[in-house]
Amino acid sequence: MTLGSHLQELHGLPAFAFPDAGDTPADASALPSPESVAWRIAVDSYDSKEEWEDAFARFLETVDTRQVRALIVGAWSDAYESGPDEVIKALVAARDRLPALRGVFLGDMLSEECEISWINQGDVTPLLEAFPDLEEFGVRGGSELVFPAVRHERLRKLTVESGGLPVEVVRGIAGSDLPALVELDLWLGTPEYGGDADVADLEPFFAGTRLPSLKHLALRNSEIQDAVCTALASAPVVARLEVLDVSMGVLTDDGATALLTGQPLTHLKKLDLHHNYLSEELRTRLLETLEPAGVEVDADSDDADSDEEDDGTVWRFVSVGE
């Protein structure tokens, strides 16, 4: 699967692209009200005529940023070679001008701008430190991503999208104290693209003790989806979830059977397993077991495809890799 469109919303607000340099209006009267949209600021990743920090400076001078509630950072110059250090510095420097900021997404790029596993990141936690009132934070890209353990009192949603999430990032998030976090969404990816976490590294998420408010857990887009589901079958955190998402990965009958024969799942509002390698028999069993209890089950195989070699070796793939 490729990412075919930019983010359509952030923090419950529709995305709006701040105009390019040549199209910037003389004043803000031609733009949406500052609090009504999630402002997307981006430059060309290839041969950019303007650095991202310069586009952001125009934004600061044009929009009443005291009312801005959400920012989407799109492509910065040469994102396939350079991380967002200057982007993060610019945002941190402007923190006093963004007192209402509650949502940030870093790296909203499509494949033609920069493949997800080519996006260079860095240490993104200075943004959490600079904005203690932030409620939603998202990052796309796992290459060079750094996320040491932090404490943040108000963050409610954390998303990290990658074709391969480094184990140190997984451990950093797992070691973080996030008492208000309701939704956690991690795309674990594959070893080929740097996703070297094992199921043992996910144990703090299964226990959930550092995430007392968690209601929506997504551990997805991985080759170890069966092992993840086997662990979730007896994980203490599941009993208090409303949404469990193990989609986009290499999920087979083994993992799905472990879920079904483990602790009850009938309290869930939704179980998401889309993009999977389940047999029709087990897919039917999932639906017949959970849907009568009111659980919304997405067991669609979507575009999951496998290749079989002459020697019988079967290759299965996650939804988002490169």
Image (cartoon, rainbow, N blue to C red):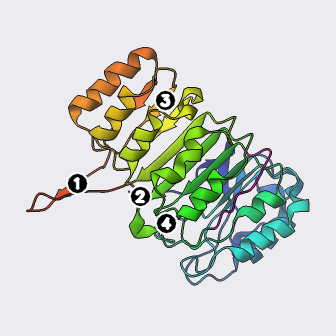
Are there few (<14), some (14-19), or many (20+) residues within 10 Å of tag 4? many
Name above or below for residue 82 compared with residue 223. below
Q: Quadrant of the C terminus?
A: bottom left
Residue 242: which quarter of the image?
top right
Lower sequence index among marks 2 and 3: 3
Task: Look at the numbered disc 4 and give the secondary structure of its residue.
Answer: loop
Whole-number angstrom distance, CA of label 1 to CA of label 4: 22 Å
Query: Does the rendering let one see residue 64?
Result: no
Residue range (magenta)? 146-155
Report the residue that reaches farthest toward the right. 96
- Identify which amino acid the numbered label 1 is placed on: Ser
Secondary structure of the magenta portion, mostly? loop
Q: Which mark is residue 116?
A: 4
Are there few (<14), some (14-19), or many (20+) residues within 10 Å of tag 1? few
Callout 4 touching callout 2 (CB < 8 Å): yes
Query: What residue did someone put label 2 on?
Result: 320
Q: Is residue 113 left or right of residue 50?
A: left
Whole-number angstrom distance, CA of label 2 to CA of label 1: 14 Å
Q: Position of residue 164 (x, y in %)?
A: 47, 63
- Identify which amino acid the numbered label 2 is placed on: Val
- Identify which amino acid the numbered label 3 is placed on: Lys
Lower sequence index among marks 4 and 2: 4
Query: What residue did someone put label 1 on?
Result: 306
Task: Look at the numbered disc 2 and give the secondary structure of its residue.
Answer: loop
Q: Which mark is residue 270?
A: 3
Between residue 237 and residue 318, name the one nearer to us: 237
